[in-house]
Image (spheres, grey):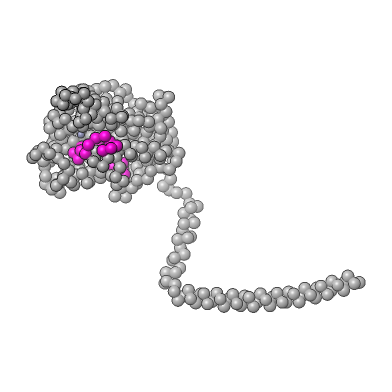
Amino acid sequence: MSKQKLSKEKSLQRTKMYAQLIACVAVLGAGAYMVKNAFDDSKTVSQSPYYEDTELPEITTEQATTEPDPNKLLFESSNIATKDKYKGDLILVNNDHQYFGGDEDLVSIMEMNDKTGRDFFTAVDYTYTIQGCVYEPLAQMVEDFYNKYFNDTLIIYGSFRSTEFQQQLYDDDLANTGEGESTRVAKPGFSEHETGYAFDFSETENYDYDGTGDFAWINENCFKYGFIVRYTEEKEGITQIQDEPWHFRYVGIPHAYYITKNGICLEEYIDLLRSYVYEGEHLEITDDSGKSYEVYFVPSDDGSDTTMVPVPVGKEYTISGNNVDGFIVTVYKDGIPELMKYEPGSAGSSSGDSENSGEDDSDVSDDSSTDDTADSGEDSAEY
Ligand SMILES: [Zn+2]
């Protein structure tokens, strides 16, 4: 009985409590509503007419993370001959890293000029050769220069040199100076000229090209054509070669962009690329025309004849050795630039660089037989 009474009292109390609670909530709610209105009022005063739009980005970013990224590349494995790490347009050749090539795909600059009807620059003679893939970017650069300044005095004064010829230059310099070691001429096997990817400009008026006057345009714009000014005063401590404003090295458009825009030398760039391994973050490069590239490094499997190099599926790419410890893969996400399109071997000899394009890759490398028949005479004793 008492229990029932108690519970009746309790339920009464409860009802009372609920009533109080409801009243409380009502008061609080009214207060909150008033406060909210006050805020809303102040908002309507200060808010921009595009208030609705300012909330949009939050929604779009959420959507972007859930949708698959169309720019994400798919990769497959490709078997590359490990010794091909000594080939390609990104090889580093300097006092510490010898060049082991010998199957360059060389073209005569003057022959190519004759073939393509270019008469606004020349070479010392018909024996001056460079890698086939270098000719068109070089000629296009000089053509653009000519159309700007109507200056046709440029001459290729140094280009490919066989190791024998480099030896001759080296010995001549020793004989001239009477010293035991040359500080002006690279040791045979250690000159970038032996790769066929480098050339020296001169001019036919004073034979003194220093990259100033009209020629400043060349030194400032060469990266757009895939060239770098290889030896600058600022980097002498790293390259171990004095300032040479006349010496240009072909590395291809994306790499020339990155090297030039970031003010680094090839030694520093090759070093930097080692941190962009395939498994990690890749180096993203965009050129002025908006074309984008992805670059990554794959260490060579030096214990094996072949190295597994991951390559993108359905995208154009090139593989170059770095001449030290691996391969650099360049993915042309928007296609290979027109200027870089070149069919290796179209000059007659075998492929000089391990460039591939397209989907399936079966890079059958040929023996690196030393073929030094094409000799380019040069009388200047520089690198
Ligand atoms: Zn040179």
Residue at x 46%, y 63% (from the top left corner): 56
181 relative position to 37: left or right: left
310 relative position to 259: left or right: right
Decide if residue 121 is in sight here.
Answer: no
The single residue placed furthest to the front in the displayed view is 179
Q: Quadrant of the C terminus?
A: top left
Residue at x 11%, y 44% (from the top left corner): 151
Instruction: Specify the quarter for ligand 1.
Output: top left
The single residue placed furthest to the right in the displayed view is 1
382 relative position to 48: left or right: left
Is residue 190 depicted above or below 221 in this figure?
Answer: above
| Image position, residue 358 (x, y; %) | 36, 37
Q: Within the magenta stretch, is there residue 255? A: yes
Q: Quadrant of residue 239?
A: top left
The single residue placed furthest to the left in the displayed view is 205
Q: Which residues are magenta?
A: 236-259
- Asked whether 176 or 114 is in front, the reply is 176
| Image position, residue 67 (x, y; %) | 48, 51
Decide if residue 266 is in sight here.
Answer: yes
Is residue 205 depicted above or below 64 in this figure?
Answer: above
Q: Quadrant of residue 78?
A: top left
Q: Quadrant of the N terminus?
A: bottom right
309 relative position to 175: left or right: right
| Image position, residue 174 (x, y; %) | 18, 24
Q: Quadrant of residue 26?
A: bottom right
| Image position, residue 94 (x, y; %) | 28, 31
- Asked whether 302 or 122 is in front, the reply is 302
Residue at x 33%, y 43% (from the top left corner): 335
Count of marks overlaid on the render: 0
- Asked whether 364 or 200 is in front, the reply is 200
Residue at x 29%, y 47% (from the top left corner): 261
